[in-house]
Amino acid sequence: MKVLAFETSCDETSTAVVEAGTVLANVVASQTALHREYGGVVPELAVREHLRCLPWLAREALRQAGLGAADLDAVAATRGPGLPGALLVGLKAGQGLAWALGRPFLAVHHHEAHLVSPWITGDPPRAAWECFRPNLSLVVSGGHTLLVHVVDLLRHRLVGQTLDDAAGECFDKVAKLLGLPYPGGPVVDRLAAEGNPRAHAFPRPKLADADDEFSFSGLKTAVRYFLRDHPGLAEDGQGIRDLCASAQAAIIEVLVTKTMRAARRLGVGCVTASGGVTCNSGLRLALAKACSDAGIELRLAAPAFCTDNAGMVGVLAECKLSRGVGPSDPDEEPAPGWELTDLTASA
Ligand code: KG4
Ligand code: ZN
């Protein structure tokens, strides 16, 4: 089954073509340069950029896959969660194209798509479903921080999530306080590599709590007060590197400790991770060590499938359609606040 997929939930416009679990094309136009001067995503600009880019990105994905629109068997797009206007662009374009081609359309939950990305490996990238096993999945990005128990390929249960800021948002806000460019995560990651993670003891919010919820807004506030009490630190190169390393160490310790605790409690033999923050080199190393110590298999999404991409949307859509799930109502509206739990209840 050949599926064309669209992803426009936030600030990446992406299109992909998937067939038999193989990602034949996965094209991403990132808007970070556009939003950088505002220090964060400006929804109105994001929507306009999605509208401007989606048509040629769709043609480009088909060109790279060596297919024409008439060859497609289905179309899929992210329906939520995300920015309302941004979701509207990809969803309505997908529904319109499916209608014009007389093909089924499937609306995809963005977080459910993240759950499949750790299984997409190799060149060309393909979903290694033959390796699939029940797992605990950490989905960690600028918009979300979730722990999901993936019981079966299409059956999962939300275990915990952040009560306030997402981990990536915390990286971005710490970077902003230091006057570093948006998005802050990759910059903090790079500077942290040359800093001392034990230079400052920042709080580890909810580390000691037995629940599976996260909270990162207090950490950002702690960094803000620290900078207020240490004026001049943001001017000093090594000071900035030590601060980045210390803040990153706090975020990583919370993410890894709580993930491993939940994995042990649930008795899963596999931990997976995806989302933009999974690109973080310190997090990748820390998860690898923790899983190896615990004798648990670790599958980290490849960097191209960590950040938002239509490849994961297409892989999930094909997986669902080929198993008889869907198609969706062709007139559905975007679901900006769509909870993964709603999906689990209706699955
Ligand atoms: O998944 P993504 O592209 O978009 C969503 O938010 O859904 O994730 C973007 C987030 C940003 O907050 C960015 O700072 C963070 O992922 N990020 C990183 C790294 N690369 C991206 N955070 C820490 N270290 C990185 N290397
Ligand atoms: Zn995402």
Image (cartoon, helix red, strand yellow):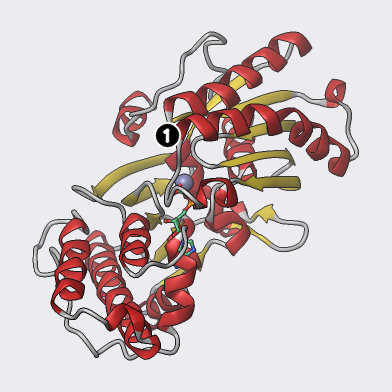
User: Does 108 sit left or right of 58 as displayed?
Assistant: left
Q: Quadrant of residue 221?
A: bottom left
Residue 19 is left or right of residue 142, and the answer is right
User: Position of 210 compared to 4: left or right?
Assistant: left
The reply to whether the residue tagged 1 has its Cβ within 8 angstroms of ligand 1 is yes
**Looking at the image, residue 176 lies above or below residue 81:** below
Give the quarter of the figure containing the N terminus.
top right
Residue lying at 32% horizontally and 51% vertically, measured from the top left: 146
Is residue 129 shown to the viewer in this render? yes
Q: Position of residue 292 (x, y in %)?
A: 40, 82
Q: Is residue 10 above or below residue 239?
A: above
Look at label 1 and name its amino acid: Gly
The residue at the far left in this view is 209
Q: Quadrant of residue 255?
A: bottom left
Q: Does any portion of residue 321 appear in the rendered image?
A: no
Q: Quadrant of residue 102?
A: top right
Dot 1: what SS? loop
Screen quadrant of the C terminus: top left
Judge the density around disc 1: few (<14), some (14-19), many (≥20) Cα neighbours within 10 Å: many
- Please state which of residues 37 and 153 is positioned toward the viewer in this rendering: 37
The residue depicted at 58 percent of the width and 38 percent of the height is 313
Residue bearing mark 1: 82
How many marks on residues? 1
In the depicted view, which residue is nearer to us: 254 or 153? 254
Q: Residue at x 30, y 60 (%)?
A: 170
The residue depicted at 43 percent of the width and 25 percent of the height is 84
Residue 70: x %, y % from top left: 86, 20
Q: Position of residue 124 (x, y in %)?
A: 77, 57
